[in-house]
Image (tube, rainbow, N blue to C red):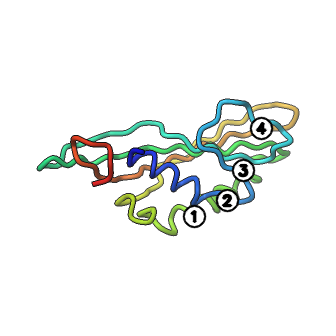
Amino acid sequence: MSARENILQAIVTLINGAGGASVYRSREEPVTRQEGAVIVVRPEEEQVDLVGMGHSKRMLTVVFEVTLRGAIPDQLADPILVALHSALMADTTLGGLCALVQEIGTKYDFEMADQQALVAEVRYVVTYGTPARSLALS
């Protein structure tokens, strides 16, 4: 498994149940009302810099999609976002898998459904290193 996938799996384990939400590592099927709050973890992009002597510095953008429905969905999402952030900031090296996890922003997308629906996308950048010729941890 690549360093990237190890990091993503560690994140899913770390935030599992954050704020009472179900957590998935990527997902294609729609979230139903009966499921309640759901967090989907997915990679968005990765930038790579060669930092000498065959080592790469990688900056992986990870998106956390928090989906839920309710009368004031952003208010309902707030404790989930707080719990998610607290879990990630408790160990910003993910147990030594990376150098740093840092938040870069949140986007809110409201939709009318059978109840008011919200998808809040929170982005974090995970900085880690690998050998330039491998996707394994350095």
Q: Which residue is mark 1?
A: 87
Q: Which residue is mark 3?
A: 22
Q: Position of residue 13 (x, y in %)?
A: 58, 57
> Which of pointers 4 and 3 indicates the residue nearer the eye?
3
For marks 4 and 3 on the same chain, the one whose residue lies earlier in the sequence? 3
Q: How many angstroms separate mark 2 from mark 1 (CA)?
A: 8 Å
For marks 4 and 2 on the same chain, the one whose residue lies earlier in the sequence? 2
Mark 1 is surrounded, within 10 Å at the Cα level, by few (under 14), some (14 to 19) or many (20 or more) other residues, namely some
Q: Which residue is mark 2?
A: 18
Task: Name the disc covering residue 9, or none.
Answer: none
The reply to whether discs 2 and 1 touch (Cβ–Cβ < 8 Å) is: yes
Q: Position of residue 110 (x, y in %)?
A: 71, 36
Quadrant the N terminus occupies: top left
Q: Residue at x 39, y 44 (%)?
A: 2
Q: How many angstroms separate mark 4 from mark 1 (CA)?
A: 25 Å
Q: Nearer the viewer, residue 122 or 136?
A: 136
For label 1, the SS is helix
Q: Position of residue 102 (x, y in %)?
A: 44, 56
Q: How many angstroms separate mark 3 from mark 1 (CA)?
A: 15 Å
Quadrant of res 33: top right
For label 2, the SS is helix
